[in-house]
Amino acid sequence: MCYAIPGKIEKIEKNTVTVDYFGEKRKALNELTEINVGDYIYAQGGFVVSKVSSSEAESILALWKETFFHLQEVDLRLSRLNLGDNNADKRLLEILDKASQSKELGRDELLYLLELKDPAGLELFFKTANFLRQKYHKNSCCVHGIIEISNYCLRACRYCGISSHNKELQRYRMTKKEILESAQVAVQDYGFKSLVLQSGEDPGYSADELADIIKEIKERFPALIFVSFGEIGIEGLQKLYKAGARGLLMRFESSNPRIYEEVHPGQKLESRLIHLQQAYKMGYMIITGGLIGMPGQTSRDILNDIFLAKELHAEMFSFGPFIPHPNTPFAVLPSAQVEEVIKVLAVARVIDNAQAKILVTTALETLSREAAKKGLLAGANSLMLNVTPLAYRKFYSIYPNRAHQSEDIAVQIEATISLLRSLGRAPTDLETI
């Protein structure tokens, strides 16, 4: 099973192609030079990734045909919503009725949802978010692979296990050869069509060296490339985009400057926002969001975080739990609760129901084995699998006891396939038109 379904090009208009998936029409941007109407392609993140031969595509589609429509039926069944025969709180029902009709909610209504505690009310709220996800995104679920190329970091963030505070951590930095080999395994052996390259803010790689790595991955192993190297400067972002990177994963973590500066001593929120704003202008797809449960954070702060992600034109919302590492200054602080993070994912779906993809983070899965399923049933539609070599993965210790820390890629894939099939989700992230 590949993490994209091949589609047939039906129309080409300048740099945009219309792709047919079993009668559903979807669009993608094309940067390849030699494709024609009638060709089969793989696409991820709204971009054509590669051309695929007719024989290979037709073989894969023959296996997918019955499954494709069966998954749609399962998803429709699980996303049905009935607010009429419910004894929930009257105000909650009024808010969810507005949300289900895609009417804009006021901030007081959104805060009500964020602060909701009643288990039955929460279940109904999550069902509403899932209904909106299905309404606008159907059963698509994008699955990315992430390669953590280095755990060196010059920053002193007060909660993060790879920050300069952690003197006990064994540091590593993958060579270009190792990174290329990891990309080859992910793309050629396991079928990933989208990769995130991630590290701390590591001065051991120059922007030119990172650009060279990205360029070679693009030439050898067709995939959509996201980068997550922290604040590498506007010029650095330009170099990586020119080399072929098309997505930027960079959380702003908090829209509250006071909280941001308390957690990130010596750093300013403004600098991070400038990176995100300039990256969007360059053409990057933006993945961003905040941490839930940080010290001093209020529900209003979290709501502002969600709106900020939308203002930054986030292609994907990434909201995860605050989990302080034991070898950092914030070690004694509590981690976020799973339910609080799930509520944020659901509110994010209500706020940006038609546009955003919403990620279930590894950090959330670390807090609960059921987190991926719960998140996907509360409006989320994206997952990331860790394809970092096992020899290094345990040292990317941003928080303790990470989910999938010692799992082989094949084990992660098998579990993900099983989960997606049980929920009726298909591994494609192009929107239906």
Image (cartoon, rainbow, N blue to C red):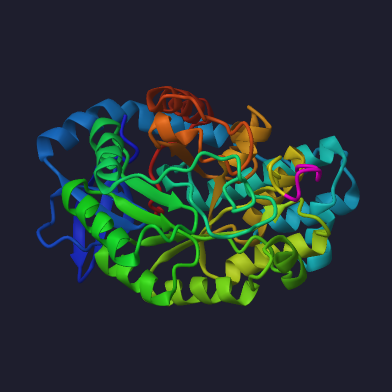
Residue 419 versus residue 146: which sits nearer the camera?
146
Q: Is residue 191 above or below residue 254?
A: above
Whether residue 245 appears in this view of the structure is yes
Q: Is residue 29 above or below residue 42?
A: below
Residue at 60% over, 50% down:
132
Residue at 25% over, 31% down:
189
Give how far across and how far down residue 240 sits, in percent: 32, 65
Give how far across and how far down residue 301 sits, in percent: 77, 64
Residue positioned most to the front: 167
> Is residue 332 on the magenta stretch?
yes
The quarter of the image holding the N terminus is top left
Give how far across and how far down residue 79 sits, in percent: 60, 38
Q: Main secondary structure of the magenta part?
A: loop
> Is residue 379 on the magenta stretch?
no
- The answer to whether 336 appears left or right of 431 in the picture is right
Residue at 39% over, 57% down:
204
- The answer to whether 298 appears left or right of 229 in the picture is right
Q: Quadrant of residue 257?
A: bottom right
Give how far across and how far down residue 36 sits, in percent: 11, 57
Whether residue 104 appears in this view of the structure is no
Bounds of the magenta span? 329-335
